[in-house]
Image (spheres, rainbow, N blue to C red):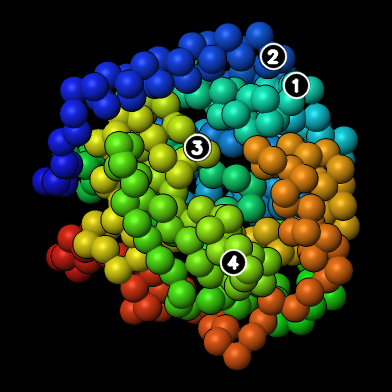
Amino acid sequence: MIDVPPISALAAYKLRLKRRRYLWRSFRSRHQLQRVHDRTDSLTDRTVIAVTTLRNEILRLPYFLKFYRARGIGHFLIVDNGSDDGSLEYLSEQPDVSLWRTEASYRNARFGLDWMTWLQIRYAHGRWCLMVDADELLVFAQDDRLDIPGLTAQLEARGQTAFGALMLDLYPKEALGAQTYQSGQDPREVLQWFDPESYRRVRQNPLGNLWVQGGARERAFFERAPERSPTLNKIPLVKWNRRFAYVNSCHSILPRELNFAYDGPGGDQPSGALLHTKFLPEIVSKSETEKQRGQHFNDPAAFDHYYDTLTSAPCLYHDGSCQYEGPQQLESLGLLTSGWLAEITASG
């Protein structure tokens, strides 16, 4: 059992109101979505769904889909937010993808959460659902023996309905943009390094979510303002209920009890890692475009320095970098935890 500390009746009431506001926003946002292909009639109660919002990810999509298909994801719910690079056309051809498009503001839709929450309300109720970006690959202990449906079955057997992960930035040894990446290639062949330490965590109230910061992006881009560095904790895998709502990406969720399924690096709860492959060569050319769009931060101007630094093609590798070898290595470093999963897979 996961220990969930109580909060006051007033705080609980305010969180219920917040959740209802988010659900209402999501319900209204359905009018912004234009259905391209709805193939959800193939879903069964056992189908594990992945949901994402993306824009101009044609380079990543072939491997993204291949990776998650091989790990047991049975269907993808995808919102295309104005792609003009062929992503929409490519996704339209995929038989296990249900696809919507919108030209509405990503930022005004709570960075896509309103759209994705509506799809979860409509199609994910009662099913396990994975929320990931196109540049995130979920790994966990024993994943060479246990696929994602197998993982969810073990979680559910123990009464656990959520699974947390650390977002771990992978980067190349050379300056950004100096590599070659081919569509369909495993990005881990190009991005082989990560920061093995300097992660800190704190539990926030009243939501109960972790706040994990540190790692490569803080070191490289936010050294003078570490309090503004990216949030690295996520709860990407949840057995969904139409009354659930993510609060900030999938960094936190309501009801608050779900946040306690993840206790961060070095914790006791089984957890994984979302390998963040943001730093493929295209990042240099894309950064100027994203700076001009101003869609990814609440205060875009405050992050101009971040995009400017990326555009200058820095080298993120340093003496403390570690070459990625796999989930077992990450567990030995305390960045993910097998917990009771190790006992189950060892015996079964």
Q: Quadrant of residue 189?
A: bottom right
| Amino acid at the residue labelled 4 | Glu
Find disc 2 in the rendering and name its residue: 32
Q: Which mark is residue 183?
A: none
Which residue is at 59% across, 66% downward?
218
The earlier-in-sequence mark between 3 and 2 is 2
Q: Residues within 10 Å of mark 3 (few under 14, many from 20)?
A: few
Find disc 1 in the rendering and name its residue: 104
Which residue is at 74% across, 59% downward?
306
> How far apart, in angstroms, are the residues tagged by discs 4 and 1?
31 Å
| Amino acid at the residue labelled 3 | Asn
> How far apart, in angstroms, are the residues tagged by discs 3 and 1?
19 Å
**Camera-side mark, 2 or 4:** 4
| Amino acid at the residue labelled 1 | Ala
> How far apart, in angstroms, are the residues tagged by discs 3 and 2?
20 Å
Q: Which mark is residue 248?
A: 3
Q: Which mark is residue 218?
A: 4
- In this picture, is 161 found above or below 288? above
Q: Position of residue 92 (x, y in %)?
A: 73, 29
The earlier-in-sequence mark between 1 and 2 is 2
- In this picture, is 145 found above or below 48? below
> How far apart, in angstroms, are the residues tagged by discs 2 and 4?
35 Å
> How far apart, in angstroms, are the residues tagged by discs 4 and 3?
19 Å
The earlier-in-sequence mark between 2 and 4 is 2
> How far apart, in angstroms, are the residues tagged by discs 1 and 2?
7 Å
Q: Position of residue 270 (x, y in %)?
A: 27, 57
**Camera-side mark, 3 or 1:** 3
Describe the element under mark 2 as helix, strand or loop.
helix
Describe the element under mark 1 as helix, strand or loop.
loop
